[in-house]
Image (cartoon, rainbow, N blue to C red):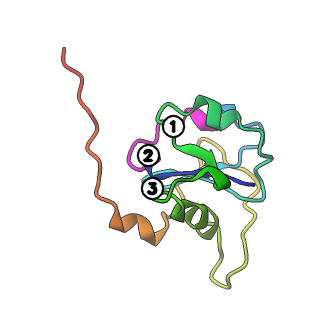
Amino acid sequence: MALVIQSQCIDVKDGICTTSCPVDCIYEGERMFYIHPTECIECGMCESICPVDAIRYDDELDADNAIFAEINREVFLAADGELEEPGGWYKTAPPIKDHPRLAHYARRVPETQDS
């Protein structure tokens, strides 16, 4: 089983999940975060802290989010199709390029709070 970040994270990018990850396997993308499939130790810390309930084990994904198991893996593939091993995310790292499938998801506008 692998942990996967689903569509609820798109354009939200709260980032609290990165603070709970003991192995820094959650990488910031342009519109969402991604969990590296082999760096993750499947501890579940990120799942328990995600404010938008976007993180699940791959065998728990609903039909609408099942594609995110592939998206979270494929975003780390090199041009030759091999899985890149970046070695851990850090806060000042530039965002990785989002998976092309994210272009099919409408942009979310952040909710505004009334004063």
Q: Which residue is mark 1?
A: 53
Secondary structure beneath disc 3?
loop
**24 sits to left or right of 52:** right
**Residue depicted at x 76% and y 64%:** 85
Q: Characterize the local packing of mark 3: few (<14), some (14-19) or many (20 or more) Cα atoms within 10 angstroms.
A: some
Which-is-in-front pick, marks 1 and 3? Answer: 1
Secondary structure beneath disc 2?
helix
Q: Where does the image place residue 99, in percent across and percent down from the top left?
A: 49, 67
Q: Amino acid at mark 1?
A: Asp
Q: Are marks 1 and 2 in contact (CB under 8 Å)?
A: yes
Image position of 95 with respect to 13: above or below? below
**17 sits to left or right of 9:** right
Determine which quarter of the picture holds residue 83: bottom right
**Residue depicted at x 49% and y 30%:** 51
**Residue depicted at x 42% and y 53%:** 31
CA distance separating discs 1 and 2: 7 Å
Q: Residue 8, labelled with which disc?
A: 2
The residue segment tinted magenta is 9-19
Q: Characterize the local packing of mark 2: few (<14), some (14-19) or many (20 or more) Cα atoms within 10 angstroms.
A: some
Q: Where does the image place residue 44, in percent across and percent down from the top left?
A: 72, 38
Quadrant assignment for the N terminus: bottom right
CA distance separating discs 1 and 3: 19 Å
Q: Amino acid at mark 3?
A: Glu
**85 sits to left or right of 51:** right
Q: Which residue is mark 3?
A: 30
Q: Where does the image place residue 15, in percent across and percent down from the top left?
A: 53, 37
CA distance separating discs 3 and 2: 14 Å
Image position of 50 with respect to 69: above or below? above
**88 sits to left or right of 91:** right
